[in-house]
Image (cartoon, grey):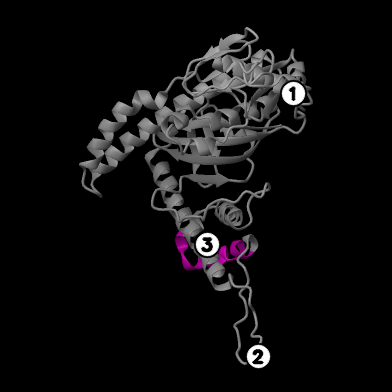
C-alpha cells in the first residue's frame, strides 16, 4: 500500500536560503534541458533524410536527447558551474525526469493516449518543489525534526504520526504561498491493496447528482449544500487585486501585495479541498458503490457558468472520491448523463424540461425534485434497475396519449 502524508516545515532563515538557491538552480537546469529537446525537435521534425535526385547532401539527423543522455551530461554541468556541486545528484536527475515526462506527454501522450499542451519554460519563482528520491530511514525523524541530506535537521510539525510498518520512500519539499511543506511517500508491502470487486445492486448503491444549486443530491434524497468558497472571498480578492495593480513593478510593496493575493487564493483552495474530502468520506460511509454522471467538466468550465463550475470543483471532488474509494475497497461508477434529468425514475417516460424547471412531474403521478429524480436515475443505471428495461416500451413524451 502506498500513502502520501504532508507536513508543514519551520525551517531557519539559512535553510530557507538554501531551499530557494536550490530551486533556482533546478529551474535553470529544467529550462536548459527543455530547450535542448525543443532544438532537437525543430531541427529533426521533418522526416525527409535524403534527396531523391541525389544531387544534394542533407545533414544527418541528430540523436534525440533522452533521459539517460541528459543525465550523463550532468557531470559536465557540475564541472562548468560549480554551484551545481552543492545539489544532490538524485535531485538533479529528478529534474531531467520531469523534463522527460512533460515532453513525451506533449509528443506521444500519456498511457491513455491523451496529449498535454506544449511545455513552457519556468519563469522566476515558478519552480516550487525539490525531490529527494532516496529513502529516508526512520531514525532520521526524531521528535519534531527530520534529517535531510546536505541540509541537516529541519523542524517539522508532525500533526499525525507515521503508521507503523511504513517506510519513507521519497520526500518532496514544496514552497507554497504560506510557507514550506514536505510530502512523504510511504509504502508498506505487507499491506495488500483492497480490491473493489463489488457488484452494484439496489441495496449497496447510491446515486449522486452534482449541480450548482446544491453541491450534490443523493438517491436517498439527502442534500449537500454548495459552500461557494470563491464567491464568498471574491470581494476581498477584488480589493487585494486593486491594491496590487497600483504597485510599481519590481518594488517590495508589489511583492508583498502578490503574496497577500496568493495567500487568499491558497486559503480558498484549502477550504474547497477540505470540503471535498469530508464529503467524499461521508458518501463512502453511506454505501459501497457511488454512481455519478460522467460529465464533461472541461467543457462546462468554458460555458457561461464557468465561475460557478470552477468554484464547485467537481473534477477535484471526483478524483478524491475515486482515491478514497480505492483505499476503502469501494467502487465509483461513472454513467452516461444523457437524459438523467428528463426521464422519470418511476416509469421511465421522458418528461422534457428546460434548465429553469426544477420540479419533475410525470403522468404516472410521480412528483419529485429535479435533482432527486436525476439521482435516482443515476442509481438505477448503475445498478440495472427493472425501470431501465420497462422504459424501452414506455418511453414517450409525457402527455402524448
User: Which label is found at residue 80?
Assistant: none
Label 3: which secondary element: helix
**Residue at left 73%, top 15%?**
204
Region of the chain picked out in magenta, as a range:
69-83
Q: Is residue 123 magenta?
A: no
User: Which label is found at residue 54?
Assistant: 2
Question: Where in the figure is residue 23, as x and y percent of width and height?
Answer: 45, 50
User: Which label is found at residue 33?
Assistant: 3
Q: Nearer the viewer, residue 131 or 17?
A: 131
Q: Which residue is mark 1?
A: 392
Q: Main secondary structure of the magenta part?
A: helix
Spatial separation of the CA atoms under disc 1 and disc 2 = 68 Å
Left or right of 283? Residue 269 is left
Question: Where in the figure is residue 8, as x and y percent of width and height?
Answer: 48, 31
Q: Earlier in the sequence, mark 1 or mark 3?
A: 3
State which quadrant residue 284 falls in: top right
Q: Nearer the viewer, residue 333 or 356?
A: 356
- Residue 222 visible in the current orientation: no
Label 1: which secondary element: helix
Amino acid at each position: 500500500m502506498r500513502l502520501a502524508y504532508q507536513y508543514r516545515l519551520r525551517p531557519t532563515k539559512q535553510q530557507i536560503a538554501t531551499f530557494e538557491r536550490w530551486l533556482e538552480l533546478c529551474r535553470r537546469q529544467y529550462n536548459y534541458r527543455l530547450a535542448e529537446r525543443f532544438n532537437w525537435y525543430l531541427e529533426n521534425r521533418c522526416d525527409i533524410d535524403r534527396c531523391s535526385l541525389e544531387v544534394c547532401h542533407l545533414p544527418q539527423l541528430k540523436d534525440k536527447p533522452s533521459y539517460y543522455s541528459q543525465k550523463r551530461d550532468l557531470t559536465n554541468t557540475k564541472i562548468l558551474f560549480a554551484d551545481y556541486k552543492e545539489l544532490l545528484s538524485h535531485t538533479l536527475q529528478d529534474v531531467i525526469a520531469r523534463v522527460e515526462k512533460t515532453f513525451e506527454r506533449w509528443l506521444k501522450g500519456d498511457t491513455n493516449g491523451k496529449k498535454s499542451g506544449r511545455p513552457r519554460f519556468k519563469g522566476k519563482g515558478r519552480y516550487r518543489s525539490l525531490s529527494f528520491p532516496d529513502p529516508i530511514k526512520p531514525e532520521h525523524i526524531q521528535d519534531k525534526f527530520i534529517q535531510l541530506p546536505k541540509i541537516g535537521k529541519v523542524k517539522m510539525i508532525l500533526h499525525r504520526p507515521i503508521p507503523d510498518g511504513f517506510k519513507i520512500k521519497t520526500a518532496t519539499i514544496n514552497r507554497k504561498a504560506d510557507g514550506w511543506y514536505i510530502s512523504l511517500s510511504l509504502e508498506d508491502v505487507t499491506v495488500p491493496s483492497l480490491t473493489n470487486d463489488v457488484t452494484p445492486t439496489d441495496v449497496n448503491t447510491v446515486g449522486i447528482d452534482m449541480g450548482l444549486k446544491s453541491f450534490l443530491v443523493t438517491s436517498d434524497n439527502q442534500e449537500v449544500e454548495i459552500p461557494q468558497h470563491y464567491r464568498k472571498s471574491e470581494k476581498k480578492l477584488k480589493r487585494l487585486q486593486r491594491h496590487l495593480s497600483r504597485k510599481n513593478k519590481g518594488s517590495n510593496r508589489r511583492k508583498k501585495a502578490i503574496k497577500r493575493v496568493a495567500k487568499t487564493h491558497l486559503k480558498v483552495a484549502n477550504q474547497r479541498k477540505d470540503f471535498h474530502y469530508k464529503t467524499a468520506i461521508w458518501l463512502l460511509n453511506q454505501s459501497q458503490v457511488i454512481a455519478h454522471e460522467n460529465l464533461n467538466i472541461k467543457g462546462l468550465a468554458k460555458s457561461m457558468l464557468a465561475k460557478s463550475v470552477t468554484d464547485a470543483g467537481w473534477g477535484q471532488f471526483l478524483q478524491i472520491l475515486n482515491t478514497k474509494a480505492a483505499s476503502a475497497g469501494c467502487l465509483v461508477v461513472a454513467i452516461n448523463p444523457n437524459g438523467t434529468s428528463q426521464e422519470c425514475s418511476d416509469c421511465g417516460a421522458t418528461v422534457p424540461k428546460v434548465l429553469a424547471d426544477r420540479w419533475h412531474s410525470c403522468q404516472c403521478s410521480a412528483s419529485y425534485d429535479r435533482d432527486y429524480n436525476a439521482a435516482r436515475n443515476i442509481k438505477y443505471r448503475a445498478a440495472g434497475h427493472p425501470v431501465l428495461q420497462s422504459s424501452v416500451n414506455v418511453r414517450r413524451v409525457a402527455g402524448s396519449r
